[in-house]
């Protein structure tokens, strides 16, 4: 509703200013005609000191300037391109002020309220404190300068009072009253607009502040929910780990523990039979041997269940390509795998290299914000080279946390070496020799 009020005030001011300016031009023509009819032209020229411009020319030029003013105003109000482009908008406002000063000079500096109309039509469209301050200051300066005593020193201007002095006294009085009323109405409309506009700005500021506070509270709630979710995920992972440990503990207790207990009891019995019954001792040892082999099978089965699910379903290279493909699909990071050569490895070494690649890719995505990760595996004759590089933020000094320390410890178990660089992105260089244990 308030936006509608300011629009109405602008339109009323526009109509009022057009009426005043056209009225001044018509008054000049009537005064000149009255002077001519009374035969007082010579007296008027002596009092004017200068030959004024013909009123007909004044009306024509003033009409052209008013049309240009209205056209420029209409283009600025209706064209989104002008409103969005600061250069075009400032140029349009500058043209407005030039036309206003020209009209004021052309109408003998009788009325300068058109500057207030220009201020109303441009200030509410300006964005930024600097632009508003600049044009406000410029309007104030022009309003002060556009006085008869100042402009008369520059331009050929004949005061309106000289024209109206040849009219009857009653008409002069009526003109003076109408002039003051119209000029005061323009000033009052300008004050009304500024009050309404300032009030509108305050309300918009309140709305923005209220929305900002709502957004702030929503962000705080989201942060709290995110913390709770992370805590829940950590608890879930911890519970899953505990459940898995308990399952493995029960399985070891039920299978391996049972077998080891039986083997321990059998060994004790063998110690008794060693001297008293050698044939039975031989049978007992056969039973213990079979029992120990079965226990070994159970242990291997339990350990095998600890392998990554990907390695249990596919080969090592397929599992590496699978994790690279999954990361590329669910994140903005592209993971490329480069393989050179091929050689079978023991499951433990495959598990270790897979976990190292998984940890390095996770670090590149999570901590390095990398957009590309390259995994290069080269199977040499004496060992395997692994290079994992990314184009992330990197770091000048590498501090080994739990993840990097874990990588170094895993590789050290196989007699391998690893090196970390973070100057340009992040690089993980690993070499694992083919030892007898690694290829068992």
Image: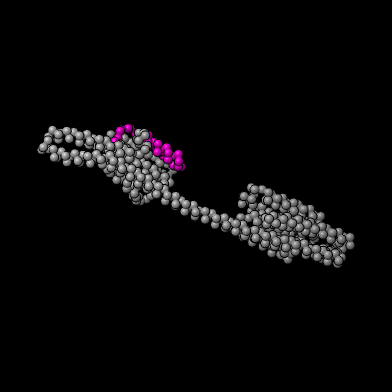
Tell me what residue is drawn at x 64 percent, y 58 percent: 200
User: Is residue 325 covered in magenta?
Assistant: yes
Viewport quadrant of the N terminus? bottom right
User: Is residue 326 covered in magenta?
Assistant: yes
Q: Where is residue 136 in the image (x, y as percent from the top left)?
A: 64, 60
Query: For this view, does 101 lie left or right of residue 314?
Result: right
Where, by quadrant of the figure, is residue 333 drawn? Answer: top left
Tell me what residue is drawn at x 30 percent, y 41 percent: 251
Viewport quadrant of the C terminus? top left
Magenta-colored span: 318-346
Using the image as rendered, state which of residue 35 and residue 47 is in the foreground: 35
- The answer to whether residue 81 is above or below residue 291 is below
Where, by quadrant of the figure, is residue 48 drawn? Answer: bottom right
Q: How is the image coloured?
A: one colour
**Can residue 353 be seen by looking at this rendering?**
no
Q: Where is residue 28 in the image (x, y as percent from the top left)?
A: 81, 59
- The answer to whether residue 331 is above or below residue 17 is above
Tell me what residue is drawn at x 75 percent, y 62 percent: 185
């Amino acid at each position: 509703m308030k936006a509608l009020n300011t629009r109405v005030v602008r339109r009323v001011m526009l109509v009022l200013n057009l009426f005043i300016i056209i009225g001044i031009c018509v008054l000049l023509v009537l005064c000149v005609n009255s002077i001519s009819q009374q035969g007082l032209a010579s007296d008027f020229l002596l009092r004017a000191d200068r030959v004024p411009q013909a009123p007909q020319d004044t009306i024509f030029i003033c009409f052209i300037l008013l049309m240009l003013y209205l056209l420029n105003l209409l283009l600025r109000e209706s064209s989104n391109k002008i409103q969005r482009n600061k250069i075009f908008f400032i140029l349009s406002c500058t043209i407005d002020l030039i036309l206003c000063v020209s009209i004021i000079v052309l109408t003998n500096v009788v009325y300068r309220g058109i500057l207030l109309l220009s201020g109303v039509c441009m200030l509410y469209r300006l964005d930024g404190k600097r632009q508003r301050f600049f044009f406000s200051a410029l309007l104030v300066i022009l309003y002060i300068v556009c006085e008869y005593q100042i402009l008369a020193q520059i331009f050929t201007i004949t005061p309106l009072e000289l024209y109206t002095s040849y009219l009857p006294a009653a008409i002069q009085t009526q003109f003076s009253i109408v002039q003051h009323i119209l000029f005061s109405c323009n000033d009052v409309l300008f004050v009304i607009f500024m009050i309404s506009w300032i009030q509108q700005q305050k309300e918009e500021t309140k709305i923005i502040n209220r929305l900002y506070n709502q957004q702030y509270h929503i962000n705080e709630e989201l942060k709290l929910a995110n913390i709770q979710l992370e805590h829940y995920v950590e608890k879930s992972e911890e519970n899953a780990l505990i459940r898995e440990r308990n399952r493995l503990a029960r399985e070891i207790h039920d299978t391996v523990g049972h077998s080891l207990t039986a083997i321990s009891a059998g060994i004790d019995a063998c110690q008794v039979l060693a001297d008293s019954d050698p044939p039975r001792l031989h049978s007992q040892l056969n039973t213990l041997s079979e029992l120990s082999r079965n226990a070994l099978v159970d242990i291997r089965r339990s350990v095998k269940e600890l392998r990554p699910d990907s390695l249990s379903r596919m080969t090592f290279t397929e599992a590496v390509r699978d994790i690279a493909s999954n990361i590329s699909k669910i994140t903005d990071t592209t993971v490329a795998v480069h393989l050179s050569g091929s050689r079978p490895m023991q499951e433990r070494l495959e598990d270790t290299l897979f976990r190292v690649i998984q940890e390095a890719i996770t670090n590149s995505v999570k901590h390095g914000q990398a957009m590309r990760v390259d995994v290069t595996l080269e199977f040499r004759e004496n060992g395997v080279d692994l290079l994992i590089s990314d184009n992330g933020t990197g770091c000048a000094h590498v501090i080994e946390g739990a993840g990097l320390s874990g990588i170094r410890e895993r590789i050290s178990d196989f007699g391998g070496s690893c090196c970390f660089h973070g100057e340009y992105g992040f690089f993980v260089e690993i070499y694992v020799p083919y030892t007898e244990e690694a290829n068992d």
